[in-house]
Amino acid sequence: MERAPHFQTPALGHRGFTFVEMLVAISLSAVFLGAASIVLTSISANSKRLTRVVELDIGSSTKNNFYEQGGSTVQTYAAPNYGRAAYVQLIRDLMLEDASQSSAVFCLPRQLENTIRPEFLPFPAGAEGATVSRPVLDTPEAFRNFLATAEPTSAGIYDSAVRNIPPTNRPDTTIFMLAPETDPTYIRVRAIYEIDLVPVTTVAGIYASVRRYKNGVLTHYYDVFYDSGSGDPFYPAFATFERTARQAVTEGSAIDRFKIAQGNPFSLVWLPDPAINPLELAPVTVTDPATSPRAAYQKMTGKTSFVVALPMFPNL
């Protein structure tokens, strides 16, 4: 006698979607996609409203010096622009990486554009058996004087003594990062960073440019334009702190207030922020006493989100 066929009900996990379930899923997807489209449209509209590209005439010599390009005009974004912040982050990361592999780092203020970007600096030892008095490069000022000998044209660029903060009439900065070198007669330059704040008259404001050079070649940069405003200028770009051991020599509160580094001396470097126009911020009132180092750079409050702490002038 034949057995009746036996049918098994499929397991619950293997059955398909019903028409009603698919209809509900499609309806929910349509709602989510519609909401996402509204949000994306709003973001795009606001981005276009806040983004402004300006064409600036910075001069042919400046453009060629900065970027090795002809012409005199550049196009850049006016602050605030949040997309450019990614470029600042890249520069900051490179700066910290270069500093970690350097034997010395020096910040020098200037008013003129920098043209000194060597791969090596001569550090002669003299003839065999001769006694040569080599400079001890343990401060930015000592390095500035040495640079004037190694690269004579630098004397006209870095013409102001430097200790803790740059002079108010020297708004631009060059950061020299020196690397170990096996040849005792040379000093290797690992990288050079430049911060320039160029006044522009065609569109009233400041053109900020930050660049990294290696072996004299531009490798990375970012720029932004700050419209003129009633706020304080972007100053100072750096402040250098010395070892507490230097407190043994009293030199006045203007200098002694910076002798607070417990270990190696260091510098705080403020990078121009594309997301903030410092010239449109309300002026900052200095409230710290003159004996505090913060009084020297308190006006930088709120001007940038990018502050880098770099080790300074360890002995070569």
Image (tube, rainbow, N blue to C red):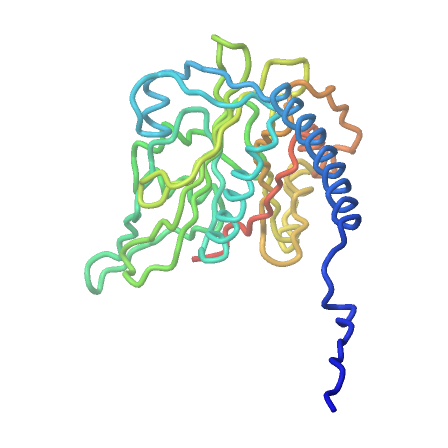
Q: Is residue 5 above or below residue 314?
A: below
Q: Is residue 190 above or below residue 108?
A: below
Q: Nearer the viewer, residue 253 or 35?
A: 35
Q: Nearer the viewer, residue 16 or 272?
A: 16
Q: Residue at x 73, y 43 (%)?
A: 26
Q: Residue at x 23, y 60 (%)?
A: 130
16 with respect to 100 (left or right): right
In the current view of this chain or complex, which residue is farthest to the top? 202
Residue 139: percent from left, percent from top = 49, 47
Residue 195: percent from left, percent from top = 48, 32
Q: Is residue 300 above or below residue 13?
A: above
Q: Quadrant of residue 269?
A: top right
In the current view of this chain or complex, which residue is farthest to the left? 127
Q: Quadrant of residue 74?
A: top left
Q: Residue at x 71, y 31 (%)?
A: 39
Q: Quadrant of the C terminus?
A: bottom left
Q: Is residue 38 above or below residue 91?
A: above
23 with respect to 92 (left or right): right
Residue 233: percent from left, percent from top = 62, 21
In the current view of this chain or complex, which residue is farthest to the front? 1
Q: Quadrant of the N terminus?
A: bottom right
Residue 29: percent from left, percent from top = 73, 42
Q: Quadrant of residue 111?
A: top left
Q: How many marks?
A: 0
Q: Nearer the viewer, residue 286 or 144?
A: 286
In the current view of this chain or complex, which residue is farthest to the bottom? 1
